[in-house]
């Protein structure tokens, strides 16, 4: 079973996404901020990271950069969850090491499909 | 005298003690109320999140059957979710709200005497994307309170009904209008069906209205309006509006935008307009604009030459070649004059070198993960 590290400060969205991914047969570690995310990535290396961009303490972009610099394997996909979809915002995400992004408002069904597709790409 | 003083002190101490007790009591009661509300909301919240995650395939009857007090506790969180979801999950959540009568109450509250209630109702109707509410929300665009007008504009944008376009545009022509950015954002959300209205509003007597409509047309990519936008660029009496027309011709990205932009570069035109036109030619991505832009590298106006260099950078290999040519000409001139390595380069070469340096930085590979 693949493990997803879900980093999202909104508890309702965290609960909703966790529920959807768990129902889709994935193991989810949900955390509410960047510091907890870095710790979780070290303690339980995930197969994919779903990362909110706008968070208190550390932004998703900073977390992404830190994950790429340290605890995460290079082939582990990082998908950004972001309300900002301007080309420069996305470029910033890719430059920090993100593999893909999902724009909010999002569809839970589409989110699950995107996660499954990213995991399949790594598997193949 | 001493007795009077003691009495005053005792009365004051009593007031302080009662106030302190009052504050503590209010805090305790508020915490208890919040805990009770959280406990009441916990069950519905779990059911609601599961329902949404399952795209509303099962559990809608359970949500409609939730007792009113528990629903009231869970409703703010559920309303906040509306703005974060789309697709079937959003539709499923909306259906629950409609069945629980949330829309009916919000529609009634749009006429409340309380501005907070009116604004909240407008927000809810926008999040529910309820087209039926558009006429009432349009009425709120002339509300006497600015915050209500702001929420109404946002809600109309969220609903995305193009019939609201003219009312949003008209609301800009008042003494205390909503911000241009907010109006532009809402108009863009109305989609391409609003193009005809936006295009017609380019003849509006207010410059601010014309500028907002130009931005909305540009952001919508309304290529059918290129000729009208070009006419504004040529004929409008207001410089800011003409600059907005140039910027948005660049955004529209059609070949027909090249000629009016090139005309706007003529030396007799204001520098701000010429700089905007040069930038827009770069945004257009038309290699045909390279000779025109290369000719501007030695323009007397710093901003025009600067924008021309960066527009060439954006045009890719043809533009980069023109920038390199400008640098080479400068190198040859310096060699002929016997100038050393530290000789000050000419203005065209400086602009070209800056643009080339930025092109190199932008082209550096970034560490994109798997």
Image (cartoon, coloured by chain):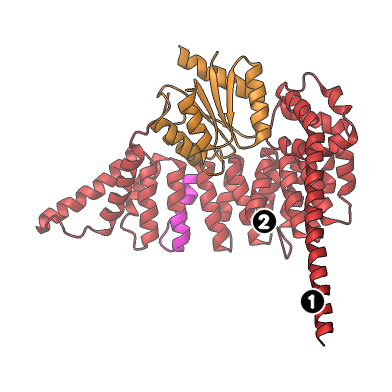
Chain colours: A orange, B red
Quadrant occupied by the C terminus of chain B: top left
Tell me the quarter of the picture where residue B38 sits. Answer: top right
Is residue B173 placed above or below B281 in the rendered structure?
below
| Classed neighbour count for the residue bearing mark 1: other residues with Cα under 10 Å, few (<14), some (14–19), many (≥20) | few
Residue at figure coordinates x 50%, y 40% from the top left: A89
Say which element carries label 2: helix
A81 left or right, relative to A45: right
Is residue A74 a member of the stretch shown in magenta?
no
Q: Earlier in the sequence, mark 2 or mark 1?
A: 1
Q: Which residues are magenta?
A: B257-276
Residue at figure coordinates x 35%, y 50% from the top left: B309
Q: Are marks 2 and 1 on the same chain?
A: yes
Q: Where is residue B218 drawn, in percent x and y?
A: 58, 45
Quadrant occupied by the N terminus of chain B: bottom right
**Chain where mark 1 sits:** B
Residue at figure coordinates x 82%, y 74% from the top left: B10
Q: Of the residues tagged 2 and 1, which is closer to the observer?
A: 1
Disc 2 and disc 1 in contact, CB within 8 angstroms = no
Q: Nearer the viewer, residue B44 or B64?
A: B44
Mark 2 = which residue? Answer: B203
Mark 1 = which residue? Answer: B9
**Chain where mark 2 sits:** B
Q: Nearer the viewer, residue B106 or B80?
A: B80
For the residues labelled 2 and 1, the Cα–Cα distance comes to 74 Å
Residue at figure coordinates x 27%, y 55% from the top left: B350
Q: Where is residue B245 drawn, in percent x and y?
A: 55, 53
Say which element carries label 1: helix
Magenta stretch: helix, strand or loop mostly: helix
- Say if residue B148 shows up in the picture: yes
Q: Furthest-bottom residue in view?
A: B1
Is residue B260 a member of the stretch shown in magenta?
yes
Tell me the quarter of the picture where residue B23 sits. Answer: bottom right
């Amino acid at each position: 079973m693949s493990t997803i590290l879900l980093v999202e400060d909104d508890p309702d969205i965290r609960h909703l996404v966790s529920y959807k991914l768990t129902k889709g047969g994935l193991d989810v570690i949900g955390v509410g901020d960047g510091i907890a995310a870095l710790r979780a990535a070290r303690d339980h290396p995930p197969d994919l990271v779903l990362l909110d961009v706008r968070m208190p303490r550390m932004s998703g972009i900073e977390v992404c950069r830190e994950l790429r610099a340290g605890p995460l394997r290079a082939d582990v996909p990082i998908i950004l969850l972001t309300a900002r979809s301007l080309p420069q915002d996305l470029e910033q995400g890719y430059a920090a090491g993100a593999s893909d992004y999902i724009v909010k408002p999002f569809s839970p069904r589409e989110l699950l499909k995107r996660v499954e597709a990213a995991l399949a790409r790594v598997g193949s | 005298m001493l007795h009077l003083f003691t009495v005053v002190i005792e009365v004051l101490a009593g007031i302080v003690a009662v106030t302190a007790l009052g504050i503590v009591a209010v805090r305790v009661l508020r915490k208890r109320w919040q805990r009770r509300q959280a406990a009441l909301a916990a069950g519905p919240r779990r059911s609601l999140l599961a329902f949404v995650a399952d795209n509303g395939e099962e559990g809608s009857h359970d949500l409609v059957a939730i007792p009113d007090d528990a629903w009231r506790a869970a409703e703010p969180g559920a309303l906040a979710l509306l703005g974060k979801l789309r697709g079937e999950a959003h539709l499923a959540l909306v259906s629950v709200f409609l069945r629980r009568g949330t829309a009916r109450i919000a529609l009634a509250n749009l006429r409340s005497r309380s501005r907070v209630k009116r604004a909240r109702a407008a927000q809810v109707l926008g999040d529910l994307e309820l087209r039926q509410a558009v006429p009432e929300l349009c009425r709120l665009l002339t509300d006497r309170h600015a915050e209500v007008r702001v929420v109404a504009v946002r809600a109309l944008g969220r609903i995305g009904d193009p019939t609201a376009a003219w009312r949003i545009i008209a609301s800009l022509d008042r003494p205390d209008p909503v911000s241009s950015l907010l109006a532009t954002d809402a108009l863009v959300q109305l989609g391409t069906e609003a193009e005809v209205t936006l295009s017609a509003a380019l003849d509006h007597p207010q410059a601010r209205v014309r500028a907002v409509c130009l931005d909305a047309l540009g952001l919508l990519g309304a290529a059918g309006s290129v000729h009208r936008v070009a006419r504004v660029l040529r004929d409008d009496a207001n410089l800011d509006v003409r600059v907005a027309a140039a910027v948005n011709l660049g955004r529209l990205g059609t070949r027909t935008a090249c000629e009016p932009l090139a005309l706007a570069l003529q030396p007799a035109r204001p520098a701000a307009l010429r700089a905007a036109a040069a930038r827009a030619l770069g945004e257009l991505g038309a290699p045909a604009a390279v000779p025109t832009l290369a000719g501007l590298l030695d323009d007397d106006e710093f901003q025009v030459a600067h924008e021309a260099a960066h527009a060439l950078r954006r045009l890719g290999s043809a533009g980069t070649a023109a920038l390199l040519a400008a640098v080479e000409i400068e190198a040859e001139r310096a060699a002929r004059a016997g100038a050393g390595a530290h000789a000050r380069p000419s203005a065209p070469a400086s602009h070209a070198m800056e643009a080339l340096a930025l092109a190199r930085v932008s082209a550096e590979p970034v560490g994109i993960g798997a």
